[in-house]
Image (tube, rainbow, N blue to C red):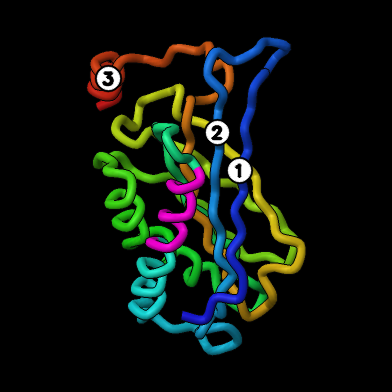
Amino acid sequence: MDIRQIYLFDQEIRAEANRPLATPTRRVAAAAVLRNPHAGKPAMDDFSGLVDLSVAVGEILTTRVLAALGDARPIGYGKAALVGTAGDLEHGAAMIHVRIGLAMRKGAGAGPALIPGNAKVGPAGMPIDIIFGGMHDAWDYNAMDSMTIGIPDAPRPDEILLAVAFLAGGRPNARIAGASPEAVAALMRGLG
């Protein structure tokens, strides 16, 4: 595991839309900048090394985020990968879509809800959005949020910036109510 840097992003929101929040929103992400062993090489189809690496790095990052949250109980989570320009989008996809979620779920004691993930290729300093979804209920609208992170000198062309994030307190001043799971099921039946 060739990690060059680890960053912690901790955002606490106390007011939104000119309204104070009863409970502050915390968006906390940890990102590792690591060497991409496949950068600059011909396209390949065996991503098992990157998948295994994502689990090991995911455990480190999840531990950092949960420690930073302290007693704040997360309700949402997300993950992202920004691949340096000598890499391939599938390098990032292998790191966030296959098994990193196991490390996140284990660390947080989370449920089966899909963990939103975002991967893209870009130069050092490019921001990436981390999309949050509910940890126990994918239809938890208060857990649907996002945060943007960026590191000025990463990723270099032969690196990957891998991030995990957790949301506590819910989206700031969330005021919309989505459809209930029952209503969604009825709508879906109507589409068929």
Q: Which residue is mark 2?
A: 26
When the figure is inspected, residue 185 is found, relative to residue 38, above or below; the finding is above
Q: Secondary structure at mark 1?
A: strand
Residue 47: percent from left, percent from top: 38, 77
Q: Range of the magenta residues?
A: 59-68
* Left or right, 7 with reference to 1: right
Viewer-nearest residue: 25 or 41:
25
> For mark 3, what is the residue?
181
Between the residue at mark 3 and the residue at mark 2, the CA separation in whole angstroms equals 26 Å
Mark 3: give few (<14), some (14-19) or many (20+) Cα within 10 Å: few
Q: Which residue is found at the position 45% from the left and 29% from the top? A: 143
Whichever of labels 3 and 2 marks the residue nearer the N terminus, that label is 2
Distance Cα–Cα, label 2 vs label 1: 7 Å
Where residue 37 sits: x, y (%)? Answer: 51, 85
Q: Position of residue 141 (x, y in %)?
A: 43, 23
Count of marks overlaid on the render = 3
- The local crowd at label 2, few if under 14, some if 14 to 19, many if 20 or more residues have their Cα within 10 Å, is many
The amino acid pointed to by label 2 is Arg
Q: Position of residue 25 (x, y in %)?
A: 55, 27
Residue type at tag 1: Asp
Give the residue at x 61% y 59%.
7
Q: From mark 1 to mark 3, how far is it between C-alphas?
A: 32 Å
Indicate the secondary structure of the residue bearing disc 2.
strand
Q: Nearer the viewer, residue 96 or 151?
A: 151
The residue wearing badge 1 is 10
* Tags 1 and 3 touching, CB below 8 Å: no
Point 33% across, 43% down: residue = 114
Circles 2 and 1: CB atoms closer than 8 Å: yes
